[in-house]
Amino acid sequence: MFSLTSGHVYHLYKEPCDMRKSFDALTGIVRNELGRNPASGEVFTFLNRPKNSIKLLHWENGGFVLYYKRLEKGTFTPPKIEAGNTSIKWPQLVLMIEGIEVKMSIQKARFMM
């Protein structure tokens, strides 16, 4: 069951990733290159060089879950994020997966705790 929500924290690995990598290799990237704990409950997103495959690594109770999608046509367009930052927001992830590219948007102020 797909259990990712807007309540999770998402990170995008900016370099192209070999899609043959599985749980152990991806957790190594998270630890060594992103400096994060892969078992933190955060979701880590990886794209391949042609940007037609995406993997999401997520720790749930009892173990890791790996979501994988390969497009038969088209590419994923990753959101633009600041240098040194890997965080992306839930709406950015959803738009990327659905193939929607927003040319211009305005984020209205919202209460954050």
Image (cartoon, grey):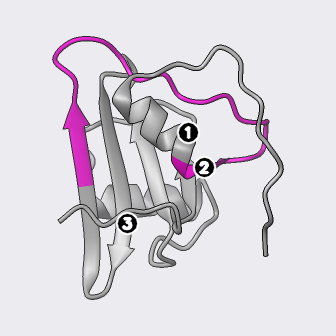
Q: Position of residue 34 (x, y in %)?
A: 61, 56
Q: Nearer the viewer, mark 3 or mark 1?
A: 1
Tag 1 secondary structure:
helix
Query: Which amino acid, mark 2?
Result: Lys
The quarter holding residue 50 reads top left
Are the residues at dot 2 and dot 1 in contact (C-beta closer than 8 Å)? yes
Where 111 sits versus 59, above or below? Answer: above
Q: Position of residue 6 (x, y in %)?
A: 51, 61
Where 110 sits versus 15, above or below? Answer: below
The residue lying at 26 percent from left, 80 percent from top is 63
Where 4 sits versus 50, above or below? Answer: below
Tag 2 secondary structure:
loop
- Between the residue at mark 3 and the residue at mark 1, the CA separation in whole angstroms equals 17 Å
Q: Position of residue 62 (x, y in %)?
A: 25, 87
Q: Which residue is mark 3?
A: 58
Task: Determine whether, in the image, residue 38 is placed left or right of residue 32.
Answer: left
Q: Which residue is mark 2?
A: 89
